[in-house]
Amino acid sequence: SQALIDQARGVMEGNDRGTYTVPTHGLYPFQWNWDSALSALGFSHFDMDRAWVEVETLMAHQWDDGMVPHIIFHEPDDGYFPGPNVWQTRRDVPTTGITQPAVAGFALRKLYDRTEDKAVARERLAKLLPKVHAWHKWFYRDRDPKSTGLVAIIHPWESGRDNSVDWDEGLDAVPIEGIAPFTRRDTTHANPDHRPSDEQYKCYIWLVEYFRGLGWDNAKLHDASPFCLVDPGFNGILIRSCDDVADLAEFLGDPSMASEARAMATKGRAALESLWNPTLGQYTCYNRAAGHLQDTPSIGGLLAAIADVPHARADALARRIALLAERCGYLVPSHDPIDGAFDSLRYWRGPTWLIVNYLIAEGLGRSEQGAMAQRILADSLRLIEKSGFAEYYDPNSGEPCGGGDFTWTAAMVIEILK
Ligand code: DGY
């Protein structure tokens, strides 16, 4: 409804800092990589110029090696930990030294399609597309050194699904000795029961200090990291974005970029098949450090639907989601409610998130699973009507969790309703 769209727009405008948005004031006072790219989709329905600017600001902070960092610390803010003095990446505008899901390519495709003045769109795209393509090449070079077709994450924060059960086993291999004492800030802004545990935070910080000690040299980090996980959702997003870059490069008349991007997508999609878990009927994570496929039934394996997977796989994913619907009130829970590790309140260990719902629905819709896509979007709107624009929601009660007035949640509402 128009009232909901107006409210969502108000949330986005409240978090707008001019050339970028913060996910929410207080808890996340900087620019986050995938939050930003997805928020651009919301802007595209009421301010197309502002939508492009959001992605332009993000890509302006790309590293020389191609990586696009997960946080850009535009303005100092004491309310967040770990800040620039912990990361020490030595950049003019400080950033973190790790990355996040590569949704920018996917978002650019939508911005291009929606921009009426194609001359303007092509001009902006001509500057942005080589950067996004360089990021994707960085992924396949530095995060897949054996050229398997699948990239690894080396820190849970890279996945965007910080405390997912998917990372528990990998984090067991991360020591926590020797880290500098620290005080968490997130738990002063949000209910500690909704956030990662102190033990997990120590692992997160250990990894940051360890990578910092290696000089943030991406040529070294993949092989050096004790935490090295292949996430089907993360790879699915990258595959889809490579395909979108290939399409856009064709529109721009750049056949060499188009064929490079298409080759990465094709290889990635074929390799994704190795993450299919027949017992669960979904994809699951591969623990590259330990060398085996995990059995953790989390949403990462459903998010792979974004990658235009084979129809038989999309059909199985839709059936798997139908099963989850019998186990909770609001699709799609970030972890299977019947699994012992499920926690309905704690961040990525159970709660439902609108951005992931949107991405799964987008993928299922393209793979002849439109009915399930609609069901997921309908549940998403039920959550908004009941609990407002929260960071995430209890999948049983629908109660709001984490931060409030959340930018990308609002952006998804506009995207779904428009
Ligand atoms: C946080 O600080 O909780 C963020 O999710 C890290 O990206």
Image (tube, rainbow, N blue to C red):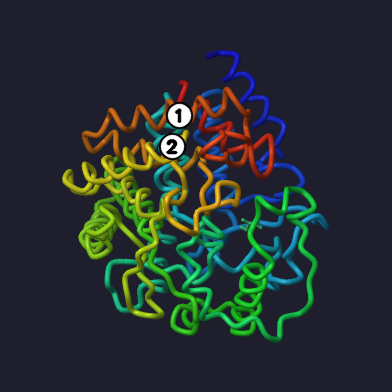
Q: Are marks 1 and 2 in contact (CB under 8 Å)?
A: yes
Q: Earlier in the sequence, mark 1 or mark 2?
A: 2
Tell me which amino acid carries mark 2.
Leu
Amino acid tagged 1: Asp
Residue 253 relative to residue 92: left or right: left
The part of the image, by quadrant, that contains residue 132 is: bottom left
211 or 298: which is nearer to us? Answer: 298
Residue 124 position in % (x across, y down) = 47, 40
Q: Is residue 168 left or right of residue 189?
A: left
141, above or below 43, in the image: below
The residue carrying mark 1 is 379
Measuring from the top left, give residue 395's x and y in whole percent: 51, 39
| Quadrant of residue 63 within the rendered picture | bottom right
At 47% across and 72% down in the image, what residue appears?
Answer: 169
- Residue beneath label 2, please? 331
- The residue under the point 44% across, 83% down is 223
